[in-house]
Image (cartoon, coloured by chain):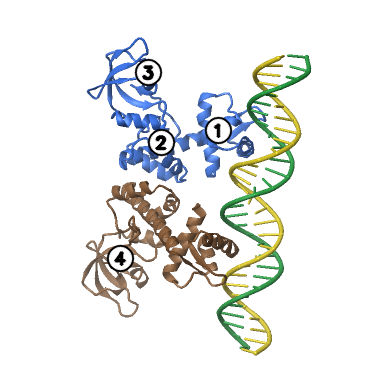
Chain colours: A blue, B brown, C green, D yellow
Amino acid sequence: MTISEENYIKVIYHLSLVSPKGVNTNAIAGMLDTKASSVTDMMKKLSDKDLVSYQKYQGVTLTEKGFHSAKMIVRKHRLWEVFLVDKLGFSWDEVHEIAEELEHIKSEQLINKLDAFLGFPVADPHGDPIPDAKGVIKKIEKQLLSEVEINAAFHCVGVKDSSTDFLKYLDKQKIALGSVVKVIDKEDFDDTLTVEIDGKRLTISNKIANNLYVQ
Amino acid sequence: MTISEENYIKVIYHLSLVSPKGVNTNAIAGMLDTKASSVTDMMKKLSDKDLVSYQKYQGVTLTEKGFHSAKMIVRKHRLWEVFLVDKLGFSWDEVHEIAEELEHIKSEQLINKLDAFLGFPVADPHGDPIPDAKGVIKKIEKQLLSEVEINAAFHCVGVKDSSTDFLKYLDKQKIALGSVVKVIDKEDFDDTLTVEIDGKRLTISNKIANNLYVQ
DNA sequence: TTTTATTTTTAGTTTTGTCTAAATTTAATT
DNA sequence: AATTAAATTTAGACAAAACTAAAAATAAAA
C-alpha cells in the first residue's frame, strides 16, 4: 500500500464510524483536502485491491481486509502519539501532525516492539483506544463531563473534539489525561459547571464539558 | 524536499566522502538501484534548487546547502538507529532498513527531542558519528583492529563493513559495541589474530580484523 | 412529476519520478 | 591521432496521483 492509499483507507475508516452504510465521495474529498474526482479514481483502485467495496454513486464501505488495514494504521498512529507524549515530552496538541507521518512506517516488528516499549497502552493521549496487534479494540467506558452526576469523582480519560484550540485551552487550565474531576455545581440556566480539577476550583462552560470524557 | 530528493542527496553525500572531486552518475544510479538517465533528470532538479552543483558529464558535488541537508538526513537516520537498538531492543543488523524510512520524517523538533531522549549520542550502533543539531560531526578516533599493537586493550567502537553477514558474525561471536578487545598474538603468515574479547579467547581472520574499529 | 440543484463520474491534462533507446561526450586503446 | 569503448545525456513514453471541465446520475424542490 502506498501512503496515499493508506490515507484514503484511514479516512474511510473514520467516516464509517459515523455513517456505516456507506461513505460518500465528497466527505472523503473534504477530509483529504482533495477533489471528488480524485476520490473516484482511488476508489476504483482500492476496489480492485479488495480493500473497499464500491458501487458507482452508492458510496463505499471497507471490506474485511480494508477494515483490518485501517485498524493497523490507526494502531500505529496512536502508538506513536503515546511515544511522542510519554517519552519525548510533546504536549497533546502537537503530536497529531507528526504521527500522520510516522503511521506510514512499514515494519510490523517495529510497531509491536514500540507497543511493548510503551507498556501496551490501551488509549492514546486524547483518550482514543489503541487496537492491539490483532486489531482488537478494547472499548473504553466513558461519559461526557456534561452528563455525569454532581459530587462524584471521575478522572479525565479523553476528548471528543481534538482541535488545537480546545487542547490548548486544556493545557492552559492544566487539565490532562488522568486529572481528577468532580462536578461541584451545575447552573440550570446555561449548564455552566463549577468543577474541582486536581483540587482546584474552576468554572467551565457547557461547550467544554461536552467535549471532555471522564470515567 | 521529497523522499526521492532526500535519497539522492544522502547518496551523493556518502559517495562524496570517497570521491570529493565529483560523484559520477553511474555511481549514484548504482546506489539507488535506478538508471543513469533518471539520475541526470534528478541532478537538474537538485541543481535548480541549489542543492548540488552540476555540470554535464563532469559529475556532481553538494553545495553548502545540500551538504547541510545531507547531514541532517544522516543525523536522523543514525539517531533512529540508536533508538531502535537502545530502546526497542533491535539488533544492529536489523535497523538499517527501518531507519531508511524513519529518516524522512520531517519535524525538526521531533529529532531534537529524540536526540535528548537518547542522551545526545555521538555514534550510532555501527560506530558511525551522529551530526549534532547544527551539523557538526565529532570525529571519532579509531583504528582498525588489524592495525593495533599486540597486548594493548581497546574497546570496540564500530564497523567498517556493515553488511548483514558481517554483523551477524559479530552477533554470533558476541562482539558488540563496547566489548573489550586485546590482541594476544598475530600470525605472520596470514595475519590471523588471536584475541581476547570480553575475557574470551578467539581466533579471527585478517578480513574480520580489517572491518572492526577499536579505540 | 417535472424541473432544478447537488453529487458523482468521465474524459482529458499535468506533475513527479521513472524507464528505454538513441545520440552525444569523454576516456581508453591501438 | 584515429578508433573503439564506456559513460552520460537527450528524447520520448509511462504509471501514479492529482487536477479541471463537462457529462451523467441522484436527490430535492416546485
Q: Residue B3, relative to residue B140: is it above or below?
A: above
Q: Earlier in the sequence, mark 2 or mark 1?
A: 1
CA separation, marks 1 and 3?
28 Å
Front label number (4 vs 1): 1
- Location of residue B158 (image quadrant): bottom left
- Dot 2: what SS? helix
Q: Earlier in the sequence, mark 1 or mark 3?
A: 1
Q: Residue A206's mark?
A: 3
Which amino acid type corresponds to the residue marked 2 in the rendered image? Arg
- Dot 3: what SS? helix
Q: Chain of mark 4?
A: B
Front label number (2 vs 4): 4
Can you identify the residue that label 4 sits on? B139
CA separation, marks 3 and 2?
28 Å
Q: Chain of mark 1?
A: A
Q: Residue A30's mark?
A: 1
Which amino acid type corresponds to the residue marked 1 in the rendered image? Gly
Answer yes or no: are tags 2 and 1 on the same subunit: yes
Estimate how packed mark 4 is, as few (under 14), some (14 to 19) or many (20 or more) residues with alpha carbons within 10 Å.
few
B183 or A116: nearer the eye? A116
CA separation, marks 3 and 4?
59 Å
Which amino acid type corresponds to the residue marked 4 in the rendered image? Lys
User: Does residue B39 appear left or right of residue A110 in this picture?
Assistant: right
Q: Is there CB contact under 8 Å for labels 2 and 1? A: no
Please name the residue shown 55% across and 41% down the image. Answer: A5
Estimate how packed mark 3 is, as few (under 14), some (14 to 19) or many (20 or more) residues with alpha carbons within 10 Å.
some
CA separation, marks 4 and 1?
50 Å
Please name the residue shown 46% across and 65% down the image. Answer: B62
Can you identify the residue that label 2 sits on? A78
CA separation, marks 2 and 4?
38 Å
Q: Chain of mark 3?
A: A
User: Does residue A114 appear left or right of residue A36 in this picture?
Assistant: left
